[in-house]
Image (cartoon, helix red, strand yellow):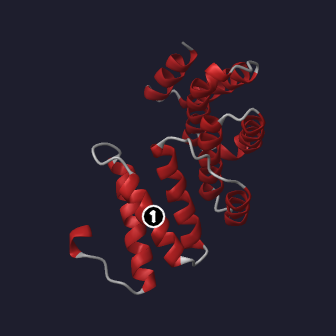
Amino acid sequence: LLTLVLTTLLRHNLDEDAAQFASMVVGRVRSFNRRSLDTLSSKVFFYFSLAYEKIDKLENIRSTLLALYRTSCLHHDEIGQAVLLNLLLRNYLHYNLVDQAQALAAKTTFPESASNNQFCRYLYYTGRLEAVQLEYSDAYMHLMMSARKAPQDIGEGFSRSVQKLMVIVQLLMGDIPERSLF
């Protein structure tokens, strides 16, 4: 019920209220220690980050996301680990904190049992990170894998972002992309 209220607040662009409510819901979810809530809690963490992103205060929740990530690692919550790792990488890249994002990506491993969508996002963020660090061949490889694994029928905005970055990386490597990509 709480996630339904939270998504309704986000849908109706009540962003300040959604951020406050999301903080309350995260506190409520943290008070439970049940494996049956792992999937639901990962959705709450995503909406928590989305609400703060909409009010442009992502830096306020970085420490909370790190604490949640540590907790999910200790509880072997692989769904939560995947979602929180992506949210942290997104948070760092949003503020151009490339060194911290690189350190996080280097010291963590992405859970193997995570969903395909989360893995696509992880590949996109690591590709973006490598592109910024001038590692174009690795960035192109990760972006290509992300484009292949992305769902074809939905997520057009994500696919478009991956394609744009892939074309830029290709141009920076000196290759000319196919005309069909343009």
Tell me, yes or no, if residue 14 can be seen here: yes
**Quarter of the figure that contains the N terminus:** top right
Residue beneath label 1, please? 143
Relative vertical location of residue 179 with respect to residue 86 in this rendering, above or below: below
Relative vertical location of residue 34 with respect to residue 51 in this rendering, above or below: above
Relative side of 63 to 35, left or right: right
Foreground: 104 or 76?
Answer: 76
Foreground: 65 or 51?
Answer: 65
Hey, what amino acid is under mark 1? Leu
Question: Percent x, y for residue 41?
Answer: 62, 26
Residue at 65% across, 25% down: 20
Q: Residue furthest left?
A: 180
Question: Percent x, y for residue 32?
Answer: 73, 18
Question: Percent x, y for residue 34?
Answer: 70, 19
**Quarter of the figure that contains the C terminus:** bottom left
Residue at 65% across, 48% down: 88
Question: Percent x, y for residue 37?
Answer: 62, 21
Location of residue 105 (image quadrant): bottom right
Relative side of 24 to 163, left or right: right
Secondary structure of residue under mark 1: helix
Residue at 57% across, 27% down: 39
Tell me, yes or no, if residue 161 can be seen here: no
Relative vertical location of residue 57 with respect to residue 21 in this rendering, above or below: below
Foreground: 85 or 46?
Answer: 85
